[in-house]
Image (spheres, rainbow, N blue to C red):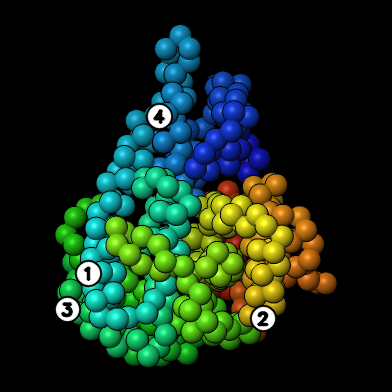
């Protein structure tokens, strides 16, 4: 299946929280003009892999894309798409109730934090609890607060470790895995709690001590990030999230890490439209010239040009026009050959296929040149 085919194009057109009239017309034309050959199975599979199935469901439902004007059904799986949006809404509301309770207790305990990624982005970028799929509560904290945060979570029944294969308990990681986390990662081992419901296999809280992985060459002054964090209601309670420039840098760094890491490639979580959409929506919030200058200055300060340019460059490819071209030009490194690389350290490889061919390629994980060294137990 071509990454430029009608199915892939339709996913890209609909993978956004709000549609323009041009988007709506293009989407309907892509369906009607390719009705006899349209592969709905491919669309369902890829929309799920890219974490946008629920978003497509919302648009199909609102715009009645599953009917011709004469009421003939043209989308055979429309109910699956619509149900995905409804189920994700229910799921995210349950997650918000749980994580709101956690944040309230952290407030009471005097833990200083900034909510990162899903919980903050879902509420303040998408403004619809069903549009973005969220899992963990990600928190940036100072290492000095790690013990207090752990005490709060333990009191709530959270345990530090991985979900057991049967999904019914939390297991401690092996000594090898614990050593890998301490040596290479910027966060502590996650805390989990099993809620016993089919749509939420676990609640997870991840405490992070830096926006960048160890050994990346980039580092952030966590105290300063927390000092300028923005007050915001998150999960129904007063909380704090990163300032807009820091939030954009954080989201870009997260995209780069997962897009180029062997572990995420093997688990098919490397290239996902949802991550590029997060970057596009955040970049769209940076509208003033001085905001971009602040953002780019911090990118330089954090020595994060490589990660941020990678994310902005490919986001501009996926969602053309969403990234300020002046920011791209100012940030562009002299050598951009790394854009087609993956892996890290001594094990750096180059993709043999261009980006858009990989984006919807279900077999790209089998084409990598090496295996991940991350312990999984």
| Numbered disc 2: secondary structure | helix
Q: Which residue is denoted by mark 2 in the rendering?
A: 301
Graded by Cα atoms within 10 Å as few (under 14), some (14 to 19) or many (20 or more), the crowding at tag 1 reads many
152 is higher (above) or lower (below) than 14: below
Badge 1 or badge 3: first in the primary sequence: 3
Graded by Cα atoms within 10 Å as few (under 14), some (14 to 19) or many (20 or more), the crowding at tag 2 reads some
Instruction: State the image coordinates of residue 156 (x, y, percent, origin top left).
Output: 18, 74
Which one is in front in this view, the residue at disc 4 or the one at disc 3?
A: 3
Q: Residue at x 55, y 64 (%)?
A: 244
Badge 2 or badge 1: first in the primary sequence: 1
Quadrant of residue 54 within the rendered picture: top left
Badge 4 or badge 3: first in the primary sequence: 4
Q: Which residue is denoted by mark 1 in the rendering?
A: 193
Graded by Cα atoms within 10 Å as few (under 14), some (14 to 19) or many (20 or more), the crowding at tag 3 reads few
Q: Residue at x 31, y 59 (%)?
A: 235
Residue situated in front as seen by the camera: 31 or 287: 287
Q: Which residue is denoted by mark 4 in the rendering?
A: 61
Badge 2 or badge 3: first in the primary sequence: 3
Instruction: State the image coordinates of residue 123 (x, y, percent, origin top left).
Output: 40, 53
Badge 1 or badge 4: first in the primary sequence: 4
Residue contact between numbered discs 2 and 1, judged by CB atoms under 8 Å: no
Q: Residue at x 29, y 69 (%)?
A: 103
Residue contact between numbered discs 2 and 3, judged by CB atoms under 8 Å: no
Q: Which residue is denoted by mark 3 in the rendering?
A: 155
In the rendered structure, the answer to whether residue 347 lies left or right of residue 93 reads right
Using the numbered discs, state the Cα–Cα distance from disc 2 to disc 3 in whole angstroms.
Answer: 39 Å
Locate the C terminus by quadrant: bottom left
Which one is in front in this view, the residue at disc 2 or the one at disc 3?
A: 2
């Amino acid at each position: 299946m071509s990454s430029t085919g009608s199915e892939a194009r339709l996913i890209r057109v609909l993978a956004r929280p709000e549609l323009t009239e041009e988007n709506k017309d293009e989407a309907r034309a892509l369906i009607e003009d390719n009705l006899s050959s349209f592969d709905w199975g491919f669309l369902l599979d890829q929309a799920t892999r890219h974490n946008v199935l629920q978003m497509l469901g919302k648009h199909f439902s609102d715009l009645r894309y599953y009917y011709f004007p004469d009421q003939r059904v043209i989308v055979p799986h429309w109910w699956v798409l619509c149900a995905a949006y409804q189920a994700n809404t229910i799921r995210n509301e349950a997650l918000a109730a749980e994580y709101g309770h956690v944040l309230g207790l952290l407030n009471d305990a005097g833990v200083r934090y900034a909510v990162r990624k899903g919980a903050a982005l879902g509420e303040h970028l998408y403004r619809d609890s069903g549009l973005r799929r969220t899992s963990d509560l990600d928190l940036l904290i100072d290492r000095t607060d790690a013990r207090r945060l752990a005490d709060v979570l333990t009191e709530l029944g959270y345990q530090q470790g991985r979900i057991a294969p049967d999904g019914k308990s939390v297991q401690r990681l092996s000594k090898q895995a614990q050593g890998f986390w301490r040596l290479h990662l910027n966060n502590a081992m996650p805390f989990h709690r099993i809620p016993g419901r089919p749509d939420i296999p676990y609640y997870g809280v991840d405490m992070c001590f830096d926006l960048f992985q160890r050994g990346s060459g980039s580092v952030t002054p966590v105290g300063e990030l927390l000092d300028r964090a923005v007050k915001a209601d998150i999960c129904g309670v007063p909380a704090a999230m990163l300032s807009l420039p820091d939030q954009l840098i954080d989201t870009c760094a997260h995209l780069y890490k997962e897009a180029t890491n062997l572990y995420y490639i093997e688990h098919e979580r490397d290239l996902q439209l949802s991550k590029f959409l997060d970057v596009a929506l955040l970049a769209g919030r940076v509208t003033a010239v001085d905001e971009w200058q602040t953002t780019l200055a911090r990118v330089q300060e954090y020595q994060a040009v490589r990660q941020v340019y990678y994310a902005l460059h490919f986001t501009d490819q996926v969602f053309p026009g969403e990234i300020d071209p002046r920011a791209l030009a100012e940030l562009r490194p002299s050598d951009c050959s790394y854009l087609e690389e993956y892996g890290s350290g001594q094990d750096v490889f180059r993709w043999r296929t261009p980006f858009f061919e990989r984006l919807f390629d279900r077999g790209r994980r089998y084409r990598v040149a090496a295996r991940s060294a991350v312990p999984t137990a």
